[in-house]
Image: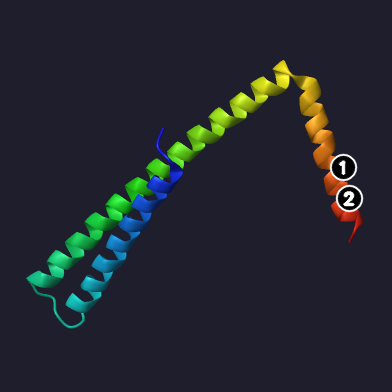
């Protein structure tokens, strides 16, 4: 299973590439519509496409992990309801104490 830190690092790298290419595009097209500007636009579009794909992939992975965690939690609660009730009661008690202090 891929660690979230590694995926986030890749997204940061992708976004940095997008920023870099966008800056190159701005500099290249400041007053120039030459072949250099077209190449910079093309690189920026490719970087954006890649970054969007990575963001979509990460979002899908996060949704799959969230669903798996919810499924595991649901199974645990059904297998061991009393410990689950005890934990929920403890959390509610602590939350009530914290709210009551205000």
Q: Nearer the viewer, residue 91 or 33?
A: 91
- Contact flag, marks 2 and 1 (Cβ < 8 Å): yes
Residue in view at x 71 percent, y 16 percent: 79
Q: Residues within 10 Å of mark 1 (few under 14, many from 20)?
A: few
Residue in view at x 26 percent, y 72 percent: 23
Q: State the quadrant of the C terminus.
A: bottom right
Side of 72 relative to 27 (left or right): right
Colour approach in the figure: rainbow
Q: Residues within 10 Å of mark 2 (few under 14, many from 20)?
A: few
Count of numbered circles in the view: 2
Side of 84 relative to 15 (left or right): right
Q: Position of residue 82 (x, y in %)?
A: 81, 22
Q: CA distance from mark 2 to mark 1?
A: 6 Å
Side of 58 relative to 16 (left or right): right
Q: State the quadrant of the N terminus.
A: top left
Label 2: element kind:
helix
Q: Is residue 34 above or below residue 49?
A: below
Q: Nearer the viewer, residue 1 or 41?
A: 1
Q: Residue furthest left?
A: 35
The answer to whether residue 29 is seen in the rendering is no
Q: Is residue 50 above or below residue 92?
A: below
Q: Position of residue 94 (x, y in %)?
A: 84, 46
Residue in view at x 37 percent, y 52 percent: 9
Label 1: element kind:
helix
Q: Nearer the viewer, residue 3 or 14?
A: 3
Residue in view at x 77 percent, y 21 percent: 81
Q: Which residue is mark 2?
A: 97
Q: Position of residue 60 (x, y in %)?
A: 44, 38
The mark found on residue 40 in the picture is none
Q: Position of residue 51 (x, y in %)?
A: 32, 53
Q: Which residue is mark 1?
A: 93
């Amino acid at each position: 299973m891929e660690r979230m830190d590694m995926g986030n690092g890749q997204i940061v790298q992708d976004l940095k590439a997008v920023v870099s290419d966008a800056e190159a595009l701005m500099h290249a097209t400041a007053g120039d519509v030459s072949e250099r500007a077209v190449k910079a636009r093309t690189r920026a579009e490719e970087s954006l496409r890649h970054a969007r794909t990575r963001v979509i992939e990460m979002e899908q992975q996060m949704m799959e992990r969230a669903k798996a965690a919810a499924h595991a939690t649901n199974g645990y609660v059904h297998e061991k309801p009393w410990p689950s009730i005890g934990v929920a009661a403890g959390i509610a008690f602590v939350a009530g104490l914290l709210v009551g202090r205000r």
